[in-house]
């Protein structure tokens, strides 16, 4: 199992930024799905669902105050296989187009910018329009659709005439595709997935704002990338901290080395003292002339210290 995890991690590290975000979304989906299977077998579906609510974006502002992180975490959670399949398929295709004209940092910034703005549109709509008043306390948003929409629209604004080949539809201009997608989302604002469609519109607006502002020399994702850099730095510090040896263990090693060095020094000192005692005894018994040249040298060296 550890070998499989290591291989997946190695592949993740080698992936492009688009691949990394797809990996992250799929990893969260698989983890949640496996926990759901186990919870079903243990008759614990309700507690798990209540736990996951802390990472889904609530329409209620009051609930949001207790879980502000959900404005970010919700865009990595998906409700069903087809939901994540289409989102990741779109992220892969349009993410590659996006990176032809923008940087990796722009991709990160636009992904989160689109997701956050889309989430805010969802919350705003559910708290403004009377149509949603009966369900606002029980409505939650999940999925990367708003973030993906921001990627699509930002690409379309930058290169509207780029042609993409769609299954069943053939060649379509990127600007046309983005426009049709936004129009469909507007037409479905009162549908069962009204919250998701409001988020789509918010993500589309975020993507357009980014592309237009960048053309004027202003990057609206700077603050988001700064926050991502701080989070990454914090993560690296935590990883390095856990990777270090325990301080107590280091002291023990250091103490053992010092003890070993002291032992060797004392042994050498005792050996020299014993040798000098033997030489002095020989002088007493037989006189200085009986010493060898080596013994005379040692006696002389000792007298100079």
Image (cartoon, rainbow, N blue to C red):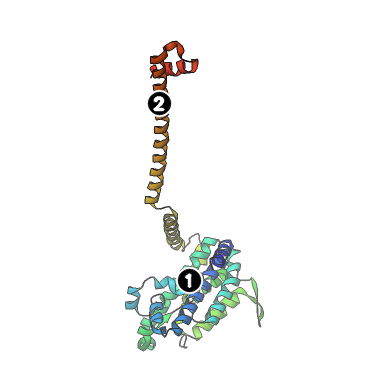
Q: Nearer the viewer, mark 2 or mark 1?
A: 2
Among the two numbered marks 2 and 1 on one chain, the one whose residue lies closer to the N terminus? 1
In the rendered image, residue 35, in percent from the top left (x then y), is placed at 46, 78
Give residue 264's quadrant in the image: top left
Give residue 275's quadrant in the image: top left
In the rendered image, residue 46, in percent from the top left (x then y), is placed at 39, 84
| Residue 158 appears in the picture as rendered | no
Give residue 301's quadrant in the image: top left
The residue indicated by pointer 2 is 274
Residue at 46 percent of width and 68 percent of height:
113
In the rendered image, residue 161, in percent from the top left (x then y), is placed at 63, 71
- Total numbered circles: 2
Instruction: Judge whether 246 appears above or below 46 on screen.
Output: above
- Tell me the number on the disc at residue 114: 1
Residue at 43 percent of width and 70 percent of height:
72
Q: Residue furthest right?
A: 170
In this picture, residue 177 sits left or right of residue 75: right
The foreground one among 140 and 146 is: 140
């Amino acid at each position: 199992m550890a070998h499989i995890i290591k291989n997946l991690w190695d592949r993740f590290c080698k992936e492009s930024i688009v691949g990394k975000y797809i990996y992250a979304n799929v990893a969260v989906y698989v983890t949640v799905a496996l926990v759901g299977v186990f919870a079903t077998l243990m008759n614990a579906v309700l507690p798990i669902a209540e736990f996951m609510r802390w990472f889904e974006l609530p329409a209620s502002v009051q609930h949001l105050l207790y879980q502000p992180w959900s404005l970010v975490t919700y865009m990595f959670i998906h409700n069903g296989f087809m939901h994540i399949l289409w989102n990741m398929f779109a992220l892969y295709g349009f993410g590659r187009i996006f990176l032809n004209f923008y940087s990796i940092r722009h991709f990160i910034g636009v992904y989160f910018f689109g997701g956050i703005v889309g989430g805010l549109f969802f919350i705003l709509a559910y708290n403004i329009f009377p149509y949603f008043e009966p369900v606002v306390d029980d409505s939650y948003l999940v999925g990367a659709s708003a973030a993906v929409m921001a990627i699509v629209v930002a690409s379309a604004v930058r290169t509207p005439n780029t042609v993409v080949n769609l299954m069943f539809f053939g060649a379509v201009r990127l600007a046309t595709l983005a426009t049709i997608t936004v129009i469909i989302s507007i037409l479905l604002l009162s549908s069962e997935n009204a919250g998701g469609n409001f988020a789509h519109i918010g993500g589309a607006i975020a993507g357009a704002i980014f592309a237009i502002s960048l053309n004027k020399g202003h990057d609206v994702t700077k603050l988001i990338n700064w926050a991502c850099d701080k989070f990454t730095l914090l993560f690296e510090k935590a990883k390095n901290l856990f990777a270090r040896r325990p301080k107590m263990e280091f002291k023990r090693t250091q103490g053992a080395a010092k003890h070993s060095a002291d032992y060797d020094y004392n042994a050498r000192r005792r050996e020299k003292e014993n040798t000098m005692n033997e030489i002095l005894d020989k002088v007493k018994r037989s006189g200085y002339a009986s010493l060898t040249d080596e013994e005379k040298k040692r006696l002389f060296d000792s007298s100079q210290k």
